Image: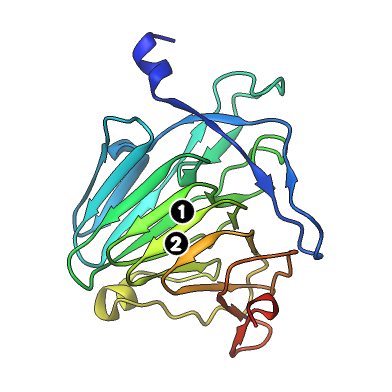
Amino acid sequence: MNHASKLRLSLRKLFVVTLAAGPLAVLPSPVWAVLPTNSSFSVTSGTASAATGVSGNVVTITASDRAVLVWGNSTLQSAVGGVPTAATDTVTNFFIGAGETYNFALPPSGSVLNRVKAGNATAALQPGTNMGAVINGSLLSDGKVFVLADTGNISVGTGAVINTSGGLVLSTLVEPNDSVYAASGSLLFNDETTTRTISLGAATVSGPLSAYSATTPSPASAPPATFFSRAFRLPRLCPWAQ
């Protein structure tokens, strides 16, 4: 690995959220991975590009209104924290490590849809299995950000910072296509079959936060949020936000 590549690596501090009101546990094995580049996602609608700041831990993703970004995953190349990795071990590219920042720069009142693909690495290498999106660092935006993981789970770790003027929408519900989003700037949220979950740690949140998933999580502490469970059909304010 050359020197330039090493400079792009960042230590990802992982957290696992227990869904039974238990404490948050720090995983013993961190993941090493690079910040996203233009090759980390494909743009299926609108325009978008990624640029890393001089500090090396901030990436700005500039997107047009209602752009759709489809995030892939990456193969882990070597042993991680003493845990051997196989050639088939992958983690999602939408992985904001502790100390890292994803800044979505959008037009006024604009939004962006991030479709994310789950990795298959074990829980020793990421906060849980089938992770479609991991937010342990900072997610910022001057608009509204959708993160749709309809093939995996979503984790917001303790210490994460979310600051959006238009809000952050997390969903693990299946959306058949992007036509509704293209027309309205929103999603259907009517899937009643998903078993995918969203775990919320004690993050710092500025701006609306809503989450659509199979079940309502109940960690020891979490940010105020409106949680929409497919089991209830109607929005419920998370008990720990009341």
| Quarter in which the N terminus is drawn | top left
Location of residue 14 by image quarter: top right
> What residue is shown with label 1?
116
* Residue at 59% across, 18% down: 78
Horizontal side of 29 relative to 162 (left or right) equals right
Query: Can you see residue 127?
Result: no
Q: Where is residue 63 in the image (x, y as percent from the top left)?
A: 22, 56
Residue at the extreme top? 2
| Discs 2/1, front | 2
Contact between labelled residues 1 and 2, with CB atoms less than 8 Å apart: yes
> What residue is shown with label 2?
147
Location of residue 110 by image quarter: bottom left
Sequence-earlier tag: 2 or 1: 1
Compared with 178, 4 (above or below) is above
Q: Position of residue 155 (x, y in %)?
A: 60, 55
Report helix, strand or loop for mark 2. Answer: strand
